[in-house]
Image: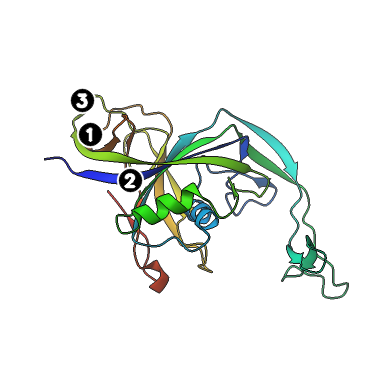
Amino acid sequence: MEETREIIRIIIWGQTAHFRIYGNQNFCDSHPLPPPSTVLGILREAIGERPPEPLELAIKGKYKGIFFDYQTFLHGAIELDHKKGWWVSRKINRYTDSKKGEDVQLNPMFVKVLYKPRYTIYVYSPDYHSYYLSKLNEPEGFISLGRSEDLAMFRVESIKAYKKQAKKKDKIKIENSYLPREIYGSAPLFLPVSHIKDRNLKMQKIYYIQEAVSYYDGAYWETEDGDKFLWLLEYKDTINGKLPKLLG
């Protein structure tokens, strides 16, 4: 008998997205899908607190095109001035000119921007299913796809998913997705997977497949309306320092 799960599906879409690949000096490249750390940040903003665990994540989706823009990055945070009731107070951080007391501004950088993104996030957390569903349907705050200007809309629903087994002759396609392991035609990426409150980002080798060039052979999951995916990561007791676990 096949395994059945009650899961949460989050559909997120917007006009633009940018998931920065750190390390570039003059060009800000972007991951094709939100990294797991970004998804955790989205959940954090929506429910208003650290996402309760255990939970499993699957991430897939695509965008309509790519364009390039210049962006200037300011190192320093804006905080609320309670007397004036507006975001006007500059909070100085470590990127500060110690002599002048002014924020240091980086040079403009060439930025890769994803146009018309649409992503699907699957969340499995049987202990907190109802909690996630109620909180995400009445979000605490706004969410964005990378940068603060990449504001996004999202829709949440509870659906059933079924674990199935495929042979290549079955012609099952898994695509537009992050994968926990390599399959034919997938590319390796090193992505941040740690929680938003972790000071040191933990990286994990994760695979990405855009369009399947070969049919999938192995266990996979399928929703009641026919969407196919693989679970990517499990978060369990990470608040006490345990690393996220790659699935599959």
Q: Is residue 158 left or right of residue 145?
A: left
In the image, which disc is placed on residue 170? 3
Q: Is residue 7 above or below residue 101?
A: above
Q: Is residue 35 visible?
A: no
Disc 1 residue type?
Answer: Asp
Front: mark 2 or 3: 2
Q: Is residue 18 above or below residue 246?
A: above
Q: Are marks 2 and 3 in contact (CB under 8 Å)?
A: no
Residue situated in front as seen by the camera: 6 or 99:
6
Which numbered disc flags the more N-terminal residue, 1 or 3? Answer: 3
What residue does disc 1 label? 217
Tell me how far mark 2 sits from mark 3, CA to CA: 25 Å
For image coordinates 41% across by 38% down, the residue present is 177
Q: Quadrant of the N terminus?
A: top left
Disc 2 residue type?
Answer: Ile
What residue does disc 2 label? 7
Which numbered disc flags the more N-terminal residue, 2 or 1? Answer: 2
For image coordinates 38% across by 37% down, the residue present is 186
